[in-house]
Image: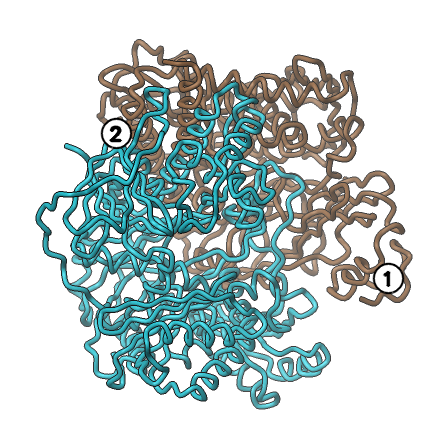
């Protein structure tokens, strides 16, 4: 990676509330947290950078590389604060964005609202043109009709245009020609082509992705340009990279062109952090478990690579309800996110069942035990009532918790309606939230054909270390790692991300009529495109390649991922492709289907630098001397009674020290609850490693 | 075990069971060949205890499967008594009266064993694209014309697949490979469910499911009853007329709400049709139940307990209780109207919770033909394009445009349909002025235009309604627009049955709009102006229906 001979590496993560900054220099890490300045985010960024560099005794001139992730694009979509955007589409298909799937995301709710498209109908404009499925021209593009739209774009003060024609994934020529015409007449217009941002079959998803890109592009271009200028003026002359939702880094130029690839970069950073830890600890099957105040995010990491996907839903109308948002087709790190965090509110429904989330008390008023006016019981209240959090040392002692308030809230909303003691009510709440997370993790792993029990949980985020033991028990997992500095996990993760770019294209082909020349030409073009993006930032660093085909049995609807070799394909490879497909299919669904033809719909090519690697940790010998600082009364469900559990300060535990569960290891940012079925030790990196007792 | 703790354990296990059946359903959706299953979600998956009580059911696209699966399990247990079930056995049927209402739905049951003991049964169903005979559509005059009839039969005996049956199935369909793939997919779906259930029973050290089933059913039953008891008691009547096949069909309903449940009696409803739009009773019960649940108890999951308090009856020989061998292939056209019928009663009880009438029955386009140059009939295409119209306005909200209700299946992308056939869609967009005017406007229907780009004739197997009888508005709201089916330059064609579209002909489809609620002149003028700006309401309609002369946003 090009570092311009300067040693310091800096990462900046803009979240909704806070902007996190991390500086690493010569093995030393310094962090800073400042408020996000939504109106001019670069101000918060500069303030955070100054603060972090100051703490590290460095200046901007020492920074060789700056990695930046931001939720600005996501927020612009959620809050509908993007540019005035028009969609130019094929005549007769004005409402693709609105008609969507023609379905309701909630079967029984007759009052539901559907998410409205980013482009209203009066800005959805059509022109005569039509391609067939194979790219053949059925109706040529009416160029005068394109020109005739200019007065409408002017009148409506359209800043950004998405062009989305039917079957444009097969041939983008009509879209390109329409762009030429518009760009010639209105050079200031930003224009997105569906065939460039998402050359994949299925018009609703492709058009939605193109309009979302167009919608955030002016805003993101302005912001990124201002940031670059501000950094330049501040004396920064290192390399600037942007974090993408796919977990790779990209250049400013590409980010300005395809800003939609920047959504969800924060969570991707968390997954990259977990990937780095998995590599450090030599854990080739890991489950990243990031549980914060409002949500829990779960991601599988196989062979030091996070699972990736190519679709993501943004701006859901109903929280966490699949199908209620806008579907984006972009390369993403595949994760499940559910409404389960420390602030998630517990209640009893009409079937006398305990429910948890998705509503959250947030940080204001927060859980009942914060004593700031919140009186609904939350997951954190459950943890407090079970005795797993030391109220004295919460948030480094800055927030004094009131356990009585937790008990009162739990009694009122859970215990009394169900006839349970407040401890059992708390136990029920915690069991339910842990069960919800376990179900999400189980389904997620099954959908990918993985055996969840063979994984190691990597737990970070404020609430994860409190819940990881029980989650592991429910999933049959034997090992958990709790890293240090988990509170700014995403930004730390950015520093471990490779520079990478993925290109995806749809090109239909059956294995029976496999055309190696066509496939090779296309893969070569995709490789060139990805190389162009990556080399701009990677300099001479060695690059790796990954090729994938999305294949299915002919007639089936859903494709599976089949890895391809990194070389030209030949006619003789057909048998190899079929063999690989059968293996992957069997791993997912238990059996193959004899005699069915196989077809390829879509191809993907990723080029990237090697991810920053850390040396594998040697084992540390046993060190005696772990001393509890006290003990806490913790609820034991099996005994239905409070029992004494020793309390340790994490910062007093040295490398190699062991503690047998049950135990609580408190630190400023969180507490790790070690259940009776686990032992815990501190490894060479200072991470807590929980292993199931023999 | 202490009472409190076991209460919590039961809750956790209930939660897990719902996750298990969801996974079962997802497996089917991801592995199925039938496009309407994989793209649209026309499937169902559930788990039953040994008494035949449904413990959990995946929420899928098809309310019609809700009670019919509950019903099917009893028939399976009658034909294959529990004591005769062996590990590795798999049973199946597509009997419309024992399954889910027509031959296209294959129902598969797998007994689930733990340590040699039968502990539960898993059922699933999927809509198969082609089952021989007329295959789909309403033209049949008895059920035997409608395709291969699979009686209650063993698909596998102690792990050995019944190859004779599989070969019989393959020999009786135009899509043998797809059908075989779908069979495997149904089998895999139940296997996954069973595997997960056994994991759960191991984790919780459970030997049988009876206590858990009791808890689930009792709590759900009580929850539904509690909702019903919030309603006034009494009887209410409603009626509704739709197009039907050879003659219009009148639905007559009397709903009785008592402290023990809700009963709907369809006495007075039209008799069976000569053609395949008749409804086996299980399907009638399913859509009756679904409509009531949407209004009365939308948050309570389906299981033996929650389904019990809602009942229905229909005279034998009426179109809502057709007996063998009546043709039933397109029973959804009639059955999916039932929520509108029960809404007619409920509107008199809780008007602020009930939508106006909508398109209701799917406007799925069944299109079939030969590829160009195919004289031997070997290269056919067969497309099921799920299509919707406008839904009815809701109290205080406009109706949803181009949205399926009550069915929850998804539409098919045009780019996918065009990759599977030579058909070309020249238009598929909203149909202006089709939503019934009202203070709250009905949802809009769609305009669709289709040609065969190979210039060859093709067939439409029509099963559409609300072409003569539009969805009605209420409380001063106007009716939605009638549907239309025709050929460009030739005029309208029939709403039901197989009809040819001649070479070069362009099929024109207008799906209906939903009914409005409230006087359109009470509508917020800026909402009218937005509709006009968006081109969804014309200026003429704004003036005529809404009394808005020069709308500005």
N-terminal label among 2 and 1: 2
Q: Chain of mark 1?
A: B
Q: Which mark is residue B540?
A: 1
Few, some or many residues within 10 Å of mark 2 (<14, 14–19, 20+) = few
Q: Colour of chain A?
A: cyan
Q: Colour of chain B?
A: brown
Query: Hey, which quadrant is residue A80 in on the image?
Result: bottom right
Q: Which color scheme is applied?
A: by chain
Q: Is residue A255 above or below residue B169?
A: below
| Secondary element at tag 2 | helix
Which x, y percent locates residue B178? 36, 43
| Name of the residue lying farthest toward the front | A629
Say left or right for A217 vs A397: right
| Placement of the C terminus of chain B among the 4 image quadrants | bottom right
Q: Name the residue tied to disc 2.
A: B163
Q: Nearer the viewer, residue A642 or A301?
A: A642
């Amino acid at each position: 990676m090009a570092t311009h001979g300067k040693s310091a590496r800096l990462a900046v993560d803009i979240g909704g509330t806070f902007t996190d900054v991390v500086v690493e220099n010569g093995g030393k890490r310094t962090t800073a947290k400042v408020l996000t300045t939504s109106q001019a985010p670069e101000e918060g960024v500069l303030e955070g950078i100054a603060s972090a560099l100051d703490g590290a005794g460095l200046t901007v001139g020492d920074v060789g590389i700056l990695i930046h992730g931001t939720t600005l694009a996501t927020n612009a979509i959620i809050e509908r604060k993007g540019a005035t955007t028009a969609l130019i589409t094929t005549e007769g298909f004005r409402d693709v964005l609105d008609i969507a799937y023609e379905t309701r995301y909630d079967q029984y709710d007759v009052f539901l609202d559907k998410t409205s498209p980013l482009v209203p109908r009066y800005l959805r404009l059509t022109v005569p043109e039509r391609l067939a499925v194979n790219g053949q021209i059925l109706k040529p593009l009416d160029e005068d009709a394109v020109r005739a739209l200019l007065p409408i774009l002017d009148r409506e003060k359209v800043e950004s245009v998405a062009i989305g024609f039917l079957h444009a994934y097969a041939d983008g020529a009509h879209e390109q020609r329409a762009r030429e015409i518009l760009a010639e007449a209105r050079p200031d217009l930003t224009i997105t082509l569906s065939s460039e941002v998402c050359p994949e079959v299925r018009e609703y998803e492709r058009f939605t992705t193109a309009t979302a890109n167009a919608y955030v592009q002016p805003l993101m271009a302005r912001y990124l340009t201002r940031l670059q200028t501000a950094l330049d003026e501040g004396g920064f002359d290192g390399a600037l990279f942007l974090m993408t939702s796919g977990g790779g880094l990209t250049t400013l130029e590409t980010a300005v062109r395809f800003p939609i690839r920047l959504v969800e970069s924060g969570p991707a950073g968390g997954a990259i952090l977990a990937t780095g830890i998995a590599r450090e600890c030599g854990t080739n099957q890991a489950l990243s478990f990031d549980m914060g105040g409002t949500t829990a995010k779960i991601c599988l990491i196989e062979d030091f690579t996070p699972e990736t996907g190519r679709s993501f839903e943004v701006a859901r109308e109903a929280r966490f309800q699949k199908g209620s948002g806008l579907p984006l087709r972009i390369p993403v790190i595949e994760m499940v996110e559910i409404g389960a965090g420390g602030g998630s509110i517990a209640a009893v429904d009409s079937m006398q069942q305990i429910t948890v989330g998705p509503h959250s008390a947030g940080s204001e008023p927060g859980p009942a035990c914060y004593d700031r006016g919140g009186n609904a019981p939350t997951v954190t209240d459950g943890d407090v009532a079970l005795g797993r959090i030391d109220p004295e040392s919460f948030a480094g002692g800055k927030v004094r918790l009131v356990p009585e308030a937790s008990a009162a809230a739990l009694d009122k909303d859970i215990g009394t309606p169900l006839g349970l003691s407040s401890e059992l009510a708390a136990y029920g709440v915690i069991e339910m939230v842990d069960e919800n997370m376990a179900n999400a993790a189980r389904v997620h792993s099954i959908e990918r054909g993985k055996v969840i029990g063979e994984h190691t949980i990597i737990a970070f985020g404020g609430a994860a270390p409190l819940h990881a033991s029980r989650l592991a028990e429910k999933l049959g997992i034997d090992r958990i790692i709790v890293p240090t500095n988990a509170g700014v996990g995403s930004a730390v993760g950015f520093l471990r991300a490779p520079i990478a770019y993925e290109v995806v294209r749809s090109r239909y082909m059956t294995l029976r009529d496999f055309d190696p020349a066509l496939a090779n030409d296309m893969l070569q073009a995709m490789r060139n495109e990805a190389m162009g993006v990556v080399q701009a930032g990677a300099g001479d660093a060695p690059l790796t390649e990954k090729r994938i085909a999305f294949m299915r049995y002919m007639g089936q609807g859903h494709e599976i991922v089949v890895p391809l070799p990194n070389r030209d394909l030949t006619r003789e490879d057909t048998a190899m492709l079929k063999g690989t497909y059968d293996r992957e299919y069997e791993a997912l669904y238990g059996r193959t289907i004899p005699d069915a033809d196989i077809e390829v719909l879509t191809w993907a090519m990723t080029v990237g630098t090697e991810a920053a690697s850390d040396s594998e940790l040697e084992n540390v010998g046993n060190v005696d001397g772990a001393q509890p600082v006290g003990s806490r009364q913790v609820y034991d469900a099996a005994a239905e009674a409070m029992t004494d559990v020793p309390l340790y300060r994490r910062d007093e535990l040295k490398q190699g020290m062991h503690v047998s569960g049950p135990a609580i290891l408190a630190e400023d940012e969180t507490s790790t609850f070690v259940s009776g079925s686990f032992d815990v030790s501190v490894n060479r990196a200072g991470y807590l490693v929980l292993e199931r007792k023999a | 075990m202490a009472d409190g703790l076991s209460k919590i354990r039961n809750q956790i296990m209930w939660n897990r069971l719902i996750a298990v059946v969801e996974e079962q359903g997802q497996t089917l959706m991801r592995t199925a060949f039938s496009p309407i299953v994989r793209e649209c979600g026309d499937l169902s998956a559930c788990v039953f205890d040994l008494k035949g009580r449904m413990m959990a059911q995946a929420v899928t696209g098809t309310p019609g499967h809700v009670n019919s699966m509950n019903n099917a399990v009893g028939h399976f247990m009658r034909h294959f008594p529990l004591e005769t079930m062996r590990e590795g056995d798999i049973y199946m049927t597509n009997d419309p009266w024992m399954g889910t209402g027509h031959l296209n739905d294959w129902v598969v049951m797998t007994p689930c064993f733990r340590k040699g003991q039968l502990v539960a049964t898993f059922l699933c169903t999927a809509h198969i694209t082609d089952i021989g005979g007329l295959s789909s559509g309403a033209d049949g005059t008895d059920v035997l014309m409608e395709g291969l009839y699979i009686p209650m039969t063993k698909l596998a005996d102690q792990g050995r697949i019944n190859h004779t049956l599989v070969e019989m199935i393959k020999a009786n369909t135009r899509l043998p490979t797809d059908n075989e793939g779908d069979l495997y997919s149904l089998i895999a779906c139940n296997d996954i469910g069973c595997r997960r259930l056994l994991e759960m029973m191991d984790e919780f050290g459970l030997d049988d499911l009876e206590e858990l089933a009791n808890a689930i059913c009792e709590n759900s039953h009580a929850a539904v009853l509690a909702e019903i008891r919030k309603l006034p008691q009494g009887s209410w009547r409603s009626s509704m007329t739709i197009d039907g096949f050879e003659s219009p069909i009148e639905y007559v309903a009397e709903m009785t709400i008592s402290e023990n449940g809700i009963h709907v009696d369809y006495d007075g409803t039209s008799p069976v049709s000569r053609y395949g739009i008749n409804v086996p009773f299980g399907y009638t019960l399913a859509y009756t139940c679904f409509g009531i649940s949407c209004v009365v108890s939308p948050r309570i999951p389906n299981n033996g307990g929650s389904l019990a308090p809602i009942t229905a009856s229909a005279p034998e020989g009426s179109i809502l209780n057709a007996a063998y061998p009546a043709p039933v292939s397109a029973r959804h056209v009639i059955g999916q109207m039932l929520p509108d019928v029960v809404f007619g009663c409920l509107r008199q009880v809780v008007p602020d919770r009930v939508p106006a009438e909508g398109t209701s029955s799917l406007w799925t386009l069944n299109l079939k033909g030969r590829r160009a140059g195919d004289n031997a009939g070997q290269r056919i295409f067969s497309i099921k394009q799920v299509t919707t119209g406008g839904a009815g306005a809701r109290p205080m909200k406009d109706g949803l445009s181009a949205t399926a209700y009550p069915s929850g299946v998804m539409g098919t992308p045009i780019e996918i349909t065009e990759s599977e056939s030579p058909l070309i869609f020249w238009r598929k967009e909203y149909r202006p002025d089709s939503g019934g005017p009202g203070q709250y406007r009905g949802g809009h229907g769609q305009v669709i235009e289709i040609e065969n780009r190979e210039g060859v004739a093709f067939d439409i197997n029509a099963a559409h309604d609300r072409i003569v009888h539009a969805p009605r508005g209420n409380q001063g709201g106007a009716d939605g627009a009638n549907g239309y089916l025709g050929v460009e330059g030739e005029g309208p064609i029939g709403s039901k049955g197989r009809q040819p579209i001649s070479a070069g002909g362009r099929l024109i489809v207008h799906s209906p709009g939903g009914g409005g609620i409230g006087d359109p002149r009470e509508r917020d003028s800026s909402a009218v102006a937005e509709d006009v700006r968006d081109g969804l309401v014309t200026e003429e309609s704004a003036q005529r229906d809404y009394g808005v002369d020069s709308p500005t946003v």
